Amino acid sequence: MCGIVGYTGPKEAYPIVITGLKRLEYRGYDSTGVALLNDGLKVYKKKGRVAELEEAIIGKDLHSSTGIGHTRWATHGEPSDINAHPHISASGKLAMIHNGIIENYAQLKKELTNKGYKFTSETDTEVLLNFIEDIQENNQCDLLEAVRVALKRVTGAYVILLLNSATPDTIIAARKGSPLVIGVGKGEHFLGSDASPMLEYTKEVVYVNDYELAIVRPNELILKNLGNEKITPFVTKLDMELAEIEKGGYDHFMLKEIFEQPSTIHDCLRGRLDATAGTITMSGIQDNIEHFKNAKRIIIVACGTSWHAALLAEYIIEELCRIPVEVEYASEFRYRNPIINKGDIIVAISQSGETADTLVAIERAKENGAIIFGIVNVVGSSIARISNGGAYTHAGPEIGVASTKAFTGQLTVIAMMALKIAKEKNTISEERYRNLLLELEAVPEKVAAILKSAEDIKAIALKYKDAADALYLGRGYNFPIALEGALKLKEISYIHAEGYPAAEMKHGPIALVDENLPVVFIATKDSYHEKIVSNIQEIKARKGKVIAVVTEGDDIIPGMADDVFYVPAADEIIAPMLSTIPIQLLSYYVGIAKGVDVDKPRNLAKSVTVE
Ligand code: M6R
């Protein structure tokens, strides 16, 4: 969490930094700040959004050709002007921004306090900054050396950018566990948590690795490791356009991303699935096919929406490939001493590829000899790079905090992956295989058809916007979609919602049902249809309001439900990719009706880079 931006070169730094911060605001948005170097350090910071800072500093001296900026998701200390970054060192000579958590900051703070340091904020960042300055003063060394020495004592995660008033064109940067991209321009360099702040200036970027430090000047980029050895920067070409990170006429990124799904799913399938030839081409799977075929089990680790995709993967892979699958919350997996054997396959699913819990979970598993397979959206992200093999979801930048198109991208990859392994393992009949390829191929068109009913979904959403709670129920392949529906509603409408297996609700949640409780059933035509009809009866008998996602042509559930969303018929393995669409739109329209900033809901951040 937190977004960081930096620039050094011949241009004015402030406009680049502030525009970059707006693009990175999805990473955290409770306070904002910039530090500019020009005849000394100028720091402007404020609680609130980037636009509020921008407004507040109109007319100030913003002239500078080297600057850094930060948009914060609070960890240590509440959102406030004082806790906002950048922080200034005790001498006033250094300014620093930080994304991550310094876990041993309390110990460092104690040591510094004993030496007479005073702190103005409650942040771990201010502690690290003064720790660096203290080392520099004691060792009489340059700033890079002080940073290097300091970071060797630090535990936790960080990306830091530092300005030093003594070296006006230089930014010192370092990373461990949080992302840092450096854009290489002509006589200029850009820094960012992702590449979005530099897109219009350069397509050449360097992804900085953990335990690397950078000295960034307009004409020079020096990379070193913590052992002070030089590293040759590896420059890669960005495959991203500015239009992809703009709203493109939509009111919100979330809505744009929901509506992009026919094309993002198509992009995910393109070049991989050929239903006519009966082939799936996925080099990440092919390269590891013997491991997959012989796997005694697959463990999938993920968080949030990606965890819901993982749960659906369990159902699909076990059904089609007959390989046992375990699905783990990354945050639990990383701490609970799981049994990992050499050669075990660990699949990590992550939109951002930067989620701290998922990243550390696979790092641990890799150390124990596991093979890591990443299903990731952000190209070049940490999880993608640490994985032994993988498949990108190709959904393009997802900026709305609520994950939508990345989720359907994950489901698309999972379906292709399961089909490919099943075919290689011979655990699927040729007829079913061919049929599922055709079904997958048809998904973009079916999603487009569902999106045409957005206005109807909006009208239904308005009926339920004042609900205090909601229950989402599904069985089988639709159970993960029930969980996902509940997560989506709570994060962008602040309505308390729970997802449950439909049959499980009679073991407790049914006590909540009365005439005020909307119960959303994900009830497409599948092998559980009759069973879920009974579950709907049970809710109706207790006067609950039933909203049902059903398959077109269903002549039973529409007669029982208060409101219905229709999706085209599909194989039950594929149907969740369709039933999730009305659920996304329902949450979106409820959130909007309640006046929530759906792209940046309270307390959340897009990329959770702290544990
Ligand atoms: O980037 P990741 O997929 O690893 O992120 C995992 C979760 O933080 C994420 O899915 C989160 O739950 C979303 N806000 C859900 O919409």
Image: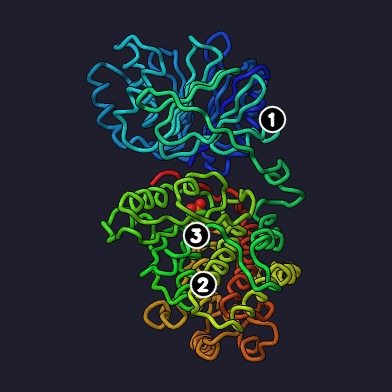
Mark closer to the observer (2, 3): 2
Mark closer to the observer (2, 1): 2
Residue that label 2 marks:
424
Q: What distance separates the C-alpha of mark 2 from that of mark 1?
A: 45 Å
Which three-letter amino acid code belongs to the residue tagged 3? Ser
Instruction: Inspect this view and state whether residue 432 appears.
Output: yes
Residue that label 3 marks:
306
Res. 113 image quadrant: top left
Name which of mark 2 and mark 1 comes first in the sequence.
Answer: 1
Mark 3: secondary structure: helix
Mark 1: few/some/many CA within 10 Å (<14, 14-19, 20+): some
What is the x, y in percent for residue 449? 74, 71
Name which of mark 2 and mark 3 comes first in the sequence.
Answer: 3
Name which of mark 3 and mark 1 comes first in the sequence.
Answer: 1
What is the x, y in percent for residue 154? 31, 31
* Vertical position of residue 237 compared to residue 383: above or below: above
| Circle number at residue 201 | 1
Mark closer to the observer (3, 1): 1
Mark 2: secondary structure: helix
Res. 372 image quadrant: bottom left
Which residue occupies 62% across, 54% down? Answer: 394
Viewer-nearest residue: 170 or 205 = 205
* Vertical position of residue 386 compared to residue 479: above or below: above
Which three-letter amino acid code belongs to the residue tagged 1? Tyr
Left/right of residue 445 with respect to residue 501 in the rendered view = right
Q: What distance separates the C-alpha of mark 3 from that of mark 1?
A: 32 Å
* Vertical position of residue 502 compared to residue 606: above or below: below
Q: Is mark 3 within 8 Å of ligand 1?
A: yes
